[in-house]
Amino acid sequence: MKNLLTVTSILLCVLLVGCSDKVEYVGDLKDGKPHGQGTITYEDGGKYEGEWKEGKSDGKGTLTYEDGRKYEGEWKAGKQHGQGTYTWPNGDKYEGDWKDGKQHGQGILYFNDGSKAVGEFKENSPWNTTLQD
């Protein structure tokens, strides 16, 4: 049976880059860990809203950083994995495949000047892309 934790400060070791350990979590729990739907707000202002499995982001969710960076998409075992969109504060945006927390597979990197790189990405870098204006 799922338990709902209204608002409580707890310490978790969550494998999300750039987030501190002190958090405020609201959502479903299973065996004392986030499981199901929930929202976690980190001490540094970052926030994850979405699906959880055994204490890690898993399924669809959105991670928003205090400085304006944002990832919206699929997660697996606490890492971006599947289809997702990452937006930087300057307006640049990557839409495409993710694997183990990195841009990996087919994608499009949109630049704030209107140009874009289209093609394959590996380990967070353009691999076989074409630059288009």
Image (cartoon, rainbow, N blue to C red):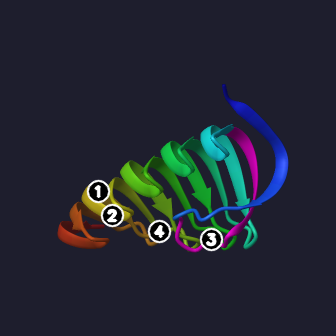
Determine contact: label 1, label 2, CB under 8 Å.
yes
Measuring from the top left, give residue 102's x and y in whole percent. 35, 65
Q: For the magenta stretch, what is the residue range?
A: 16-28
**Pointer 3 residue:** 19
Residue 107 got which mark? Answer: 1
Q: Is residue 35 above or below residue 120?
A: above
Q: Earlier in the sequence, mark 4 or mark 3?
A: 3
Measuring from the top left, give residue 129's x and y in whole percent. 19, 67
Label 4 SS: loop
Label 2 SS: strand
- From the viewer's side, name the closer residue of 85 and 9: 9
**Residue plotted at (68% across, 65% down):** 46
**Pointer 4 residue:** 92
Q: Nearer the viewer, mark 4 or mark 3?
A: 3
Gap in angstroms between the C-alphas marked 2 and 3? 19 Å
Q: Amino acid at mark 3?
A: Cys
Q: Is residue 24 magenta?
A: yes
Density class for disc 2 (Cα within 10 Å; few <14, some 14-19, many ≥20) is many
Q: Earlier in the sequence, mark 3 or mark 1?
A: 3
**Pointer 2 residue:** 103
